[in-house]
Image: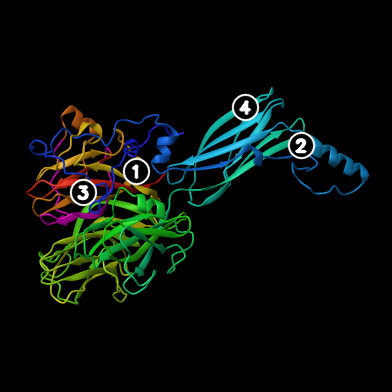
Amino acid sequence: MRNRRLVVSAALLAAGAGLVPGIAQAAPGAPAGPAGQGVAASTPAPVSGAVSGAGPDAAQKSGGRTFSSPADRTVVTSRSGAQTGGNARAKGTPEAQQGAQQGAQAVQDSPTSIYLTAHTDGARSIDLRSHVIDYDAPALDVVVAWGDGTTDTYSLPAGGGSDARDLTHKYTVLGTYDVKVTAKDTVNGTEAVNQLRFTTMGAEFTAHEPTRLLDTRTGVGAAKAKVGPRSSVALKVAGAAKVPAGATGVALNVTVTNTTGAGHISVQSTKADAEAAVTSNVNFAAGQTVPNLVIDAIGEDGYVHLFNAGWEPVDLIADVTGYFAPAAANGWGALAPTRVVDTREGLGTAKGQVPGQGSFGVEIAGRGGVPKTATAVAVNLTATNPRSAGHLTAYPSGKAAPTTSNVNFAAGQTVANSAVVPIGPDGRIDVRNGGWDPADVVVDVVGYYTPESRSALVAYGIPYRLLDTRKDSWGGRKAGPLKARTHYPMQFEGDTTKPDVDGWVLNTTVTNTRGDGFLSVTPDPNFWSDYVNGNAVTPPRPVSSALNWTKGATVANIAQTPGGKGGMIDFWNQGWEDTDLLVDLLAVYKTD
């Protein structure tokens, strides 16, 4: 069994306050803490205290799954082939029939049973408890067949009793497996068998040509009508638009438009979770059109649910750009944010604004740390200095521009949004300015997907709030905004030199903004002990942005980032005024 849990798992136990239409779990703004310089006010604290030995409840709250097969499913057979509970009639001579009947009686009287439970919070691993109960049998030979052609064996001494054995196994290939445990009594010629079906929690990525799944303005994917206040819409994802029925996760660009009041949208795998969510995916004000990328689990029925937590009706749009399934496909590759396009400087494309209805291509594969084998890229796409309202669309080269959008902007706005973009066969992607007037475009690469990686998505299903600067936080951080021009280092794993997590999928939100600014999210180069001991080095200030805001705005955007060498991540307030920050955990990428 695992003996080191993610530090964040204890934070998942935090209780939430009631909802208000603005930011999910909003509370009255806390007074600002004392002014600080460099690192954010107060000594940086971990998301929570250590949780070594937190037990299965904490593990399950961090997104684990549990499977079981009770003892009454145990099937016992004898040498003759008689089976407990079977109704097959004995064939052959009377002597054979008599022997079979005696064997069946012996089976029915067998004291052996097996109870199986399995848990996983990794991508490919299974923690199995094999509980063999036999009160008067001779020695038993136990075989655990993992369903992938490999086995483990152990023996139980004569005398009977109850033996609970914990075993761990790691699958090379993601998928569904029948795990079978057999206890053999060689003296009496009987064997007891129980099995359970186990599906790995990890899921690998397959790029999907940008496709609109939902548009309540036109009746695509749902009724042609606005989503009412405090109401939700069910969206079929798995089994729709060439997304396979076995998909368990999705990359979905969700846009809210035609808004007449402030509110937020929560996206969850079940209706109940969406309507009870204390976190948000998209935040909006009256008159705004706002997108945000959602990477999360699909419900067992193939649906996701989008909840309008505001008090006025809104239109909702959802575009799919990829899906995740428990099968070999493309794993995650983490990168520190790398700028590959800036039209203001002529980086990656011609210098100068992209004309209205114009587009440009940019080489992605084989550049900026992205391998040539990559099939899709995770980017942060920013529009700045637009002369009128419009939108940006990123899509694979060699394809016609789709009708979907990734970033929506108004005149003069600087707006960023994350996107997962399939890469064309020539290793390039295209970006189109869907507005009627010129705009500058910035593209930062934050990761990629490639068949060479085995880092799979582990989606938690329910987002967990890890930080809300308006409230006292885990580790002793007092309520107070993130100070201007400072960074806040957050510990995501125990003080380790070998992080368990390859990448973190976070939803970041700024609110109570006192001026314009932008947020950067980057891996921290220190270990947590460096901060504790006072010898941490100051990380270099990044130039990439995870989200941009204007005074008074509440803005959310997803951030995909690796932790640093010690499993730490920095959140930079790049503005000149203080702001409050919320961080929600959506999923992780793991190899094990």
- Disc sitting over residue 162 in the figure: 4
544 in the magenta segment: yes
> Who comes first in sequence, dot 3 or dot 1?
1
Q: Residues within 10 Å of mark 4 (few under 14, many from 20)?
A: some
- Disc sitting over residue 108 in the figure: 2
Say what secondary structure mark 4 lies in.
strand
Q: Measure how far apart labels 4 and 1 are at the Cα level.
A: 36 Å
> Who comes first in sequence, dot 4 or dot 1?
4
Say what secondary structure mark 2 lies in.
helix
Residue 359, visible in the rendered structure: yes
Establish if 186 lies above or below 448.
above
Query: Left or right of 345: which side holds 246?
Result: right
226 in the magenta segment: no
* Residue 220: % across, % down: 37, 72
> Who comes first in sequence, dot 3 or dot 4?
4
> Who comes first in sequence, dot 2 or dot 3?
2
Q: Measure how far apart labels 2 and 1 are at the Cα level.
A: 48 Å
Between residues 395 and 367, which one lies in front from this camera angle? 395
* Residue 224: % across, % down: 35, 72
Q: Measure how far apart labels 3 and 4 are at the Cα level.
A: 51 Å
- Disc sitting over residue 501 in the figure: 1
Q: Which mark's residue is nearer the viewer, 3 or 4?
A: 4
